[in-house]
Image (tube, rainbow, N blue to C red):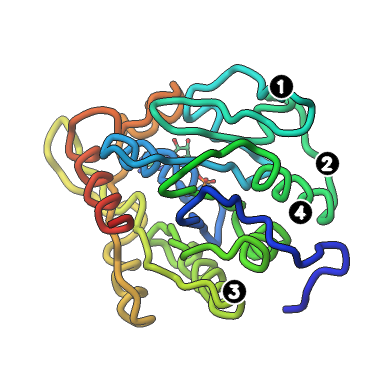
């Protein structure tokens, strides 16, 4: 992995941010943005000063998941003011363009957008800035790891083999970039039928735990397939705002990640 010719190497880490935590996945659709938004809310509920940066520039979904519909403003035409939702400061390309517009950009523009969202946003003082990365191992990941010195990365996966295969690649990328991988998070791990109590391992059982053990990494948490999680994401009210078992699981995850 080399420096990108157009990427530059100067630091783009915001000065008031104590730690940057990357939320990554190998494969798309495994619930990475869902986990990032709920984790941000859980941390804010514990009184942390939290920012949430949507690094998924081609497919920004955090504005909808966090229920933010306003556009981002820049009072001086240079620095953007983050929008605030559920106690979390956030920034996303989705707050600058219309929701149904496609972002058709090449690598250097993606890296420029990440750079702008890190260094030209008034994040202020934050305990933790969560960066929701796009799936895979591309330009945005490379720029974040080389120029913003994240404290660590967490990798979200479902227990399914195809997701785990890609998660392994994401972990390999972080190892190459010398970003510590703090652990794995299993999403969509079980389905507990609310009607009959039956438990179904829809995407397989224990796959992420096994993978974590194989790699010598902690399994940081396991989150079930859950209707309220899906509804909360669609309605812009993350399930971690409530007080059910999933919200408790996110609170435990928040405790493990930020001491
Ligand atoms: P990614 O960021 O990995 O592409 P998303 O967070 O956008 O994935 O999730 C994809 C879809 O799956 C969304 O509709 C989301 O609401 C849903 N989803 C994610 N995690 C869960 C879960 N644990 N239970 C139910 N639905 C989920």
Choose mark 1 or mark 2, whichever is in front: 1
Q: Residue 256 location in percent, x, y?
A: 26, 58
Using a 10 Å C-alpha cutoff, classify the residue at mark 4 as few (fewer than 14 neighbours), some (14 to 19) or many (20 or more): many
Alpha carbon separation for disc pair 4 and 2: 13 Å
Q: Do the residues labelled 3 and 4 touch (CB within 8 Å)?
A: no
Query: Mark 1 or 2 closer to N-term?
Result: 1
- Closer to the camera: disc 3 or disc 1? 1
Q: Which residue is drawn at 56% across and 39% down?
A: 123
Across and down, in percent, residue 106 comes to 85, 51
> Residue 259's image quarter?
bottom left
Provide the residue designation for mark 3. 173
Q: Nearer the viewer, residue 233 or 197?
A: 233
For label 1, the residue is 75
Residue furthest out toward the left = 197
Left or right of 3? Residue 206 is left
- What kind of element bears circle 2? loop
Separation of disc 3 and disc 1 at Cα? Answer: 38 Å
Q: How far apart are labels 3 and 4 at the CA level?
A: 17 Å
Whether pointer 4 and pointer 2 mark residues with C-beta atoms closer than 8 Å, the reply is no
Q: Is residue 169 above or below residue 141?
A: below
Disc 4 residue: CB within 8 Å of ligand 1: no
């Amino acid at each position: 992995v080399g420096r990108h010719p157009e990427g530059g190497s100067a630091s783009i880490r915001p000065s008031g941010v104590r730690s940057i935590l990357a939320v990554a996945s190998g494969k798309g659709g495994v619930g990475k943005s869902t986990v990032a938004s709920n984790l941000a809310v859980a941390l804010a509920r514990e009184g942390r000063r939290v920012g949430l940066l949507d690094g998924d520039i081609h497919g920004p979904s955090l504005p909808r998941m966090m229920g933010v519909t306003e556009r981002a403003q820049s009072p001086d035409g240079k620095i953007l003011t983050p929008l605030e939702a559920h106690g979390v400061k956030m920034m996303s390309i989705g707050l600058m363009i219309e929701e149904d517009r496609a972002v058709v950009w090449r690598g250097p523009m993606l890296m420029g957008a990440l750079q702008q969202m890190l260094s030209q946003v008034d994040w202020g003082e934050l305990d933790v800035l969560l960066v929701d990365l796009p799936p895979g191992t591309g330009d945005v990941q490379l720029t974040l790891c080389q120029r913003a010195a994240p404290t660590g990365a967490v990798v979200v996966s479902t227990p399914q083999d195809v997701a785990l295969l890609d998660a392994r690649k994401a972990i390999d990328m972080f190892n190459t970039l010398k970003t510590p991988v703090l652990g794995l998070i299993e999403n969509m791990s079980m389905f507990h039928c609310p009607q009959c109590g039956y438990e179904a391992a829809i995407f397989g059982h224990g796959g992420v735990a096994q993978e974590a053990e194989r790699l010598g990494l902690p399994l940081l948490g396991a989150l079930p397939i859950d209707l309220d999680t899906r509804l909360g994401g669609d309605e812009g009210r993350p399930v971690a705002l409530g007080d059910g078992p999933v919200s408790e699981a996110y609170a435990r995850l928040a405790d493990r990640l930020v001491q």
